[in-house]
């Protein structure tokens, strides 16, 4: 029953999101016919009427939305006005770069962020705790594009350790080319995950069952692993999932600075050129990606916390 309600909510969210996205593009300034025809000398009444009929632009708004939504259900996102090729092909060529970048950033901010948070919580009140808290607070105040520019200046231009642009070829080539963009994208997330991990673990350490485990002589390492870190994973996983979902829709700046041909740079190009089918498809992809990650987190959460699983079953 819970699964059916969740599925129904997802479908309703998708329908509402698709309508809002289509309505936003419909209301956007600029006539797509001018971009489709291109040369102003070809703007004859006959040519304008033919283009409007071909792309259903002469139909009422709701009829246009119905045609677009029906095509989506059949996997047809339409054709790009600018590239004159199916939008699915465009997304297919750009999506691997964005997914690689987000996955690399995800590994960085989860591993480093959780590690810093654990160390900070276990060393609460010490100089190490103050140092980690200080650098993570500083990291959250730096915008992505500033981090990206600094990384390029130091590691790409002066030291020449990394390439400035391009996604790279092959697995190791891609890792090498995406290292600086991934760091720029992950730095703020590392700080957030570290602080959430620290706060959650500090709260768990003060609970009665943890004190009881210590009083029974359980080793400190086992107490942390079994009773502190394990019970802290719920909020940590939730925060990591939300950040990851945001990254799937928020690589525009980093891709632009590093010259990566991903979804973010394609979205900017599409908006600047009024390529409405591409913009609609990317926005819908962002909605679906966000929903997929949040659903995945909801599925993982009960596995980490038996109390949530019991409530879900009941």
Image (cartoon, rainbow, N blue to C red):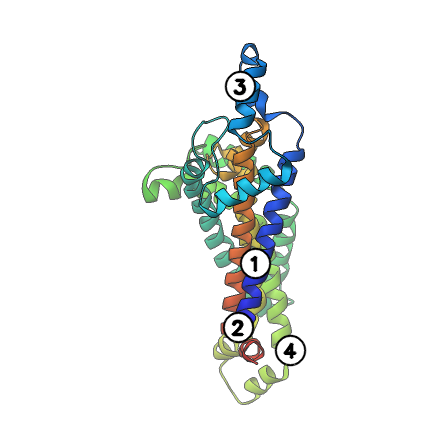
Q: Which residue is tagged 1?
A: 10
Could you tell me which residue is drawn at 56 percent across and 39 percent down? 280
Label 3 Cα crowd, 10 Å radius (few <14 / some 14-19 / many 20+) = some
Which quarter of the image is occupied by the C terminus? Answer: bottom right
Q: Which residue is tagged 2?
A: 302
Which label sits in the foreground, 1 or 3? 3
Image position of 215 (left or right of 104): right
Question: Label 2 vs label 1: CA separation?
Answer: 19 Å
Q: Which residue is tagged 4?
A: 206
Which of the labelled discs sits on residue 37, or is there none?
3
Q: Secondary structure at mark 3?
A: helix
Could you tell me which residue is drawn at 44 percent across and 34 percent down? 159
Could you tell me which residue is drawn at 59 percent across and 49 percent down? 188
Q: Secondary structure at mark 2?
A: helix
* First reached walking from the N terminus: tag 4 or tag 2: 4
Question: Label 4 vs label 2: CA separation?
Answer: 23 Å
Image position of 126 (left or right of 81): right
Q: Is 295 rendered above or below residue 83?
A: below
- Residue nearest the observer in this picture, 86 or 262: 86
Residue 86 in view, yes or no? yes
Which quarter of the image is occupied by the N terminus? Answer: bottom right
Residue 146 figure quarter = top right
Residue 123 figure quarter = bottom right
Question: Label 1 vs label 3: CA separation?
Answer: 38 Å
Which label sits in the foreground, 2 or 1? 1
Q: Residue furthest left?
A: 170
Image position of 61 (left or right of 302): right
- Residue nearest the observer in this picture, 169 or 162: 169
* First reached walking from the N terminus: tag 1 or tag 3: 1
Residue 294 figure quarter = bottom right
């Amino acid at each position: 029953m819970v699964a059916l309600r969740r599925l129904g909510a997802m479908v309703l969210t998708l329908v509402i999101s698709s309508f809002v996205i289509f309505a936003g593009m419909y209301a956007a300034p600029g006539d797509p016919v001018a971009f489709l025809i291109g040369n102003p000398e070809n703007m004859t009444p006959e040519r304008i009427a033919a283009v409007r009929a071909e792309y259903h632009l002469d139909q009422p708004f709701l009829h246009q939305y119905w045609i677009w939504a029906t095509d989506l259900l059949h996997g047809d996102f339409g054709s790009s006005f600018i590239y004159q090729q199916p939008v699915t092909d465009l997304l297919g060529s750009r999506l691997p770069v964005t997914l690689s970048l987000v996955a690399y950033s995800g590994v960085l901010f989860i591993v480093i962020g959780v590690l810093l948070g654990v160390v900070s919580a276990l060393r609460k009140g010490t100089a190490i705790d103050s140092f980690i808290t200080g650098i993570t607070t500083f990291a959250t105040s730096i915008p992505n594009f500033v981090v990206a520019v600094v990384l390029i200046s130091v590691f790409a231009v002066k030291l020449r350790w990394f390439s400035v642009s391009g996604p790279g070829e092959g697995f190791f080539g891609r890792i090498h080319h995406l290292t600086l963009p991934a760091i720029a994208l992950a730095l703020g997330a590392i700080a957030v995950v570290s602080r959430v991990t620290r706060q959650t673990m500090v709260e768990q350490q003060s609970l009665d069952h943890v004190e009881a485990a210590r009083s029974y002589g359980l080793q400190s390492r086992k107490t942390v692993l079994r009773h502190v870190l394990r019970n802290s994973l719920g909020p940590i996983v939730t925060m990591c999932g939300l950040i990851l979902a945001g990254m799937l829709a928020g690589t525009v700046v980093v891709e632009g600075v590093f010259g990566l041909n991903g979804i973010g740079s394609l979205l900017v190009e599409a908006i600047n050129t009024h390529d409405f089918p591409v913009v609609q498809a990317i926005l819908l992809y962002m909605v679906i990606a966000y929903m997929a990650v949040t659903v995945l987190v909801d599925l993982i959460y009960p596995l980490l916390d038996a109390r949530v699983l019991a409530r879900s079953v009941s």
